[in-house]
Image (spheres, helix red, strand yellow):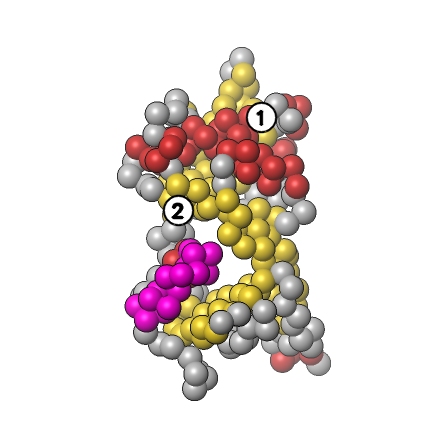
Amino acid sequence: MISSSIKDHQQVLALLQDRPKYLETFFTYAPAHKFIEAVVKPDSFSFSVNDEDGSIFVMALGSNPVILDGDEIATSRNVEMDSAKYKRQVSWDLYSMDTEGFRNFDPAIEVTNHSEIDDFLNAHARKSSVWPGNEEVLFWGEIREQGLLVATGALVQWRTGQVMFASIATHSDYRSKGLAQKLVSQMLGNASRSGISHVGLGVFAGNASAKRAYEKVGFALIGEFTSYEKIARADTR
């Protein structure tokens, strides 16, 4: 802990009321029961949370934020990290969307054949973050053409309680036809009718086509991040 940090979750929420992007990021990643501490400054914001595997996850946002002690750290894209202490992982962007405007959209059909999803992701989206059988999955949606699965994706609920899209994938032969946008819009309708008012979405920073597709649906960019892993002492020998 550092002397200037805040350990009260409600106090942090109050301080972020006029900083909506920081507030949404904090709400997404830091439920009260996992929250450890935060540092709120005029031009930066940092916080840490306990993960269920015993590790500590940190986010350090803005200009020259305090880097709290943690095992995994996500920073704003412009933050410089000590390469002797932290190993760079990936850069990614966080998007957000309210679901109410999609309540009357045609519902996405649920994929029930998990083997088919496995085969599809292996063939067309090997880097997918979520797979059938992952316990956080709420729903797999699908689009078919003449019986062929041409697009699929999952709604998941993280341990923080936040609902996110994951593993949105399109068949290699059916890309650039707006299928991902159609599927996401339909699944937002499913979410709205299920009482889920807000959905997030993480995208690899270099995936420009996916980001354009989600922005056309109406997703708003919340933050651009780079993730790091703390280097264990054994790794430095």
User: Considering depth in this image, is 25 or 236 the residue closer to the camera?
Assistant: 25
What x and y, as percent, mark residue 52?
40, 64
**Quarter occupied by the N terminus:** bottom left
Question: Earlier along the polypeptide chain: callout 2 or callout 1?
Answer: 2
> Quick one: SS at disc 2?
strand
- Seen in the image, is 215 located left or right of residue 24? right
**Type of amino acid under label 2:** Val
Q: Decide which of 224, 174 is in the foreground and name it.
A: 224
- Badge 1 crowding class, 10 Å Cα cut-off, few under 14, some 14 to 19, many 20 or more, is few
Mark 1: amino acid: Gly
Up-down: is 168 above or below 104?
below
Query: Which residue carries the number 2 mark?
Result: 163
- Residue at the image position 57 percent from the left and 43 percent from the top: 128
**Residue 229 shows up from this direction:** no
95 versus 26 height, above or below: above
Report which quarter residue 223 is drawn in: bottom right
**Distance of label 2 from label 1 (alpha carbons):** 23 Å
Mainly helix, strand or loop, the magenta region?
A: helix
Q: How many tags in the picture?
A: 2
- Tag 2: Cα neighbours inside 10 Å, few (<14), some, or many (≥20)? many
Q: Residue 85 magenta-drawn?
A: no
User: Which residue in the rendered view is the most extreme toward the top?
Assistant: 146
Q: Which residues are magenta?
A: 10-24
Above or below residue 224? Residue 148 is above
Q: Which residue is mark 1?
A: 178
* Residue 47 badge: none
